[in-house]
Image (cartoon, grey):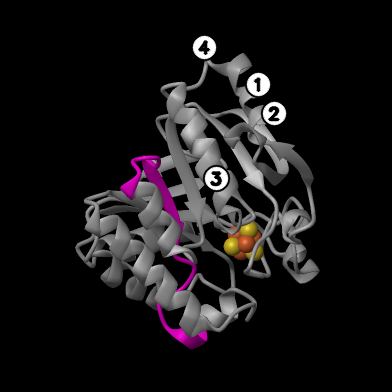
Amino acid sequence: MASQVRGRVGWIVELSGIDWPGNLTFMLFLAGCNFRCPYCQNGGIIPLDSGYEVTVGDVMMEVERSLKLIDALGVSGGEPTLQPRFVESLFEAAKKYGLQTFMNTNGSNPELLDHLFERELLDYVALDVKAPLRSDLYGKVIGEAIPGSVAVENLKRSMDVCRGYGRRFEARTTIVPGLTDNPEYVEMIAYVLKNYDCVYVLQQFSPYGDILDSRYRLLEPTPEDILRGLAEVASNTGLREVCIRYRGGMVRVT
Ligand code: SF4
């Protein structure tokens, strides 16, 4: 029975207005990730056996209590596509309640995206584009957890899946001082994104939360003027919609 499908969750945010801008979303942050980005703020839920176990039925009982307030159910992590059956069952249940569905993924499972779009279970995707799509650069930013070439190939295929279904998506790059704040990197990413229908969001790194690599706790948050400058670099490529996301919220720059 779909309601008995089990998954591991790090935590739940019953009402989020920031994960999917414009929507009030019941968000689950799923346990387990196949990347090891050193700046990750959710380090405690990277192991696959972290968090706690729930069933889809357990989650939907909580969703029911928030139904009057929310319009969507979303998954993030960790990397939600590592628990494909759980995510699919959650989205099936959400659709029965008339909710929209959202996923934030690192792009490593294009097959699941394809499957969910085909079944009309997924409405909107935020894809992490962590670095220029070059194996060496990508591998470094994801902590060499898997070969950079594999991560890049899967990400490209994920973007292609979105395009194949005519889906606009959000592409997100976290701007980390000394790691991804190079204007050339942002320019390289923007030139790739021009081939897709997407909004490009440059996210502020902040050294709070459960940072995976302790050295990154010593950094300052990415300054707002750096984010704005990099957004200009991205928009100068001709990319149409570029935003920054920082402590003050999300702002469209171009
Ligand atoms: S920031 Fe990297 S390591 Fe952390 S959850 Fe996202 S993909 Fe995984």
Label 4 is placed on what type of residue? Lys
Q: Earlier in the sequence, mark 2 or mark 3?
A: 2
Q: CA distance from mark 4 to mark 1?
A: 13 Å
Q: Residues within 10 Å of mark 2 (few under 14, many from 20)?
A: some
Q: In this image, 123 relative to 72: left or right?
A: left
Residue 137 seen by the camera: yes
- Residue denoted by label 1: 61
Q: Residue 214: where, in percent of width, then height?
A: 80, 67
Q: Callout 1: few (<14), some (14-19), or many (20+) C-alpha neighbours within 10 Å?
A: few
The N terminus - image quarter:
top right
Q: CA distance from mark 1 to mark 3?
A: 16 Å
Q: Nearer the viewer, mark 4 or mark 2?
A: 2
Which of the two labelled residues, at mark 4 and mark 3, occupies the earlier sequence position? 4
Give the residues drawn in magenta, as a range: 118-137
In this view, the residue farthest toward the top is 68
CA separation in Å, label 2 and label 3: 14 Å
Mark 4 vs mark 1: give the one in front: 1
Nearer to the camera, 4 or 231: 4
Q: Residue visible at 19% across and 63% down?
A: 238
Q: Can I make out residue 201 in this image? A: no
**Residue hosting label 2:** 58
Is 58 drawn above or below residue 67 in the view shown? below
Quadrant of residue 29 in the image? Answer: top right
Q: Is residue 112 magenta?
A: no
